[in-house]
Image (cartoon, rainbow, N blue to C red):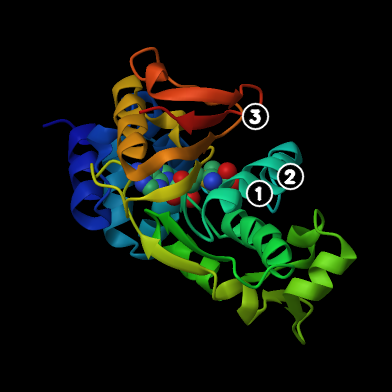
Amino acid sequence: MDDFDALKRHIEQTLKIQCGNYKEDYIKRRLLSRMRSTNTTNHGEYLKYLKATPSELEVLRNALTINVTEFFRDNDVYEILRKEILPDLFSKRKRLRIWCAGCSTGEEPYSIAMILHEIMSTNKELSVQILATDIDKVVLAKAQEGIYSPKAMVKLSDAQTHHHFNKLPDGNFQAKPHLKELIRFRPHDLMGGTPVSRWLDLITCRNVTIYFTEKQKDDLARLFHDALVSDGYYIMGKTEYLGRQVENLFVAKNSVQKIFMRKD
Ligand SMILES: C[S@@+](CC[C@H](N)C(=O)[O-])C[C@H]1O[C@@H](n2cnc3c(N)ncnc32)[C@H](O)[C@@H]1O
């Protein structure tokens, strides 16, 4: 076994991240960035450092599952959600079930929750549950806490900030209970082969599959197809796409914003 294999094995045992699920090139690039930061020059040296420095494990986890996100990322998609998709779904059902897969620190599910809260406040018969999941428990804990710096809040209007967040004494903002109670955060591995739930009306999985192989992306599209109700929606990241093998499972509702509807 060479040093790279030994390192991968150590990662799998300690972090429970299955390296084989990711492209090798991706794992190597992320490791390289950690090796530069820790002044180690090869995989063997980095493995020794990792074993000797417990704090490096969490840093490596974050590097392997990069979790950059923001509120209302790609604003147009949220406008379509607000004006078209959510009204369409609510015209068919009074209670919606939404899965936000790969939610990172929570900005995506909280953005959806803000829109839903605004819609639901004009019709008390409507309700929703958002399941927000991620493989990375560190980001999930942050999401659950719902505390964001003023810099993270720039895409929100003053009214949204005031209405949905409490300002804390240290200058940060925390999501108010009325937003939090719409969302359940849970750890979940999208490569595990099972959905977090079924009979879902909407699944958002955005900017998560960039490093998945083609087969993993296709398997995930099939998993989402199984988990959605017959006219449910699936929203991908703007730069992601449906593979040839699975494109017949969905109808494109907006091909620029990567919004699809499940086909039977
Ligand atoms: C770039 S963030 C995207 C956050 C949000 N969806 C957005 O578009 O802003 C990608 C997230 O996917 C998560 N992720 C990566 N691999 C995953 C897997 N196999 N299962 C679940 N989540 C995963 C990462 O932990 C990270 O938080």
The amino acid marked with disc number 3 is: Gln
Q: In whole angstroms, how far apart are the C-alphas of marks 1 and 2?
A: 7 Å
Q: Alpha-carbon neighbours of circle 3 within 10 Å: few (<14), some, or many (≥20)? A: some
**Contact (CB < 8 A) between labels 1 and 2?**
yes
Q: What kind of element bears circle 1?
A: helix
Q: Residue furthest toward the left? A: 1
Q: Earlier in the sequence, mark 3 or mark 1?
A: 1
Q: Which residue is mark 3?
A: 257
- Whether residue 3 is situated above or below residue 165 in the rendered picture: above
- Whether residue 64 is situated above or below residue 175 in the rendered picture: above
Asked which quadrant contains residue 192, the reply is top left
**What residue lies at 53% left-to-right and 34% top-to-bottom?**
236
Is residue 252 found left or right of 74 in the rendered image?
left
Res. 95 mark: none
On the question of residue 28 being in view, the answer is yes
Residue 63 coordinates in the image, percent (x, y):
46, 46
Q: In whole angstroms, how far apart are the C-alphas of marks 2 and 3?
A: 14 Å
Q: What kind of element bears circle 3?
A: loop
Q: Which residue is mark 1?
A: 87
The amino acid marked with disc number 2 is: Lys
Q: Which residue is mark 2?
A: 83
Residue 57 coordinates in the image, percent (x, y):
35, 58
Mark 3 vs ligand 1: CB below 8 Å: no
Q: What kind of element bears circle 2?
A: helix
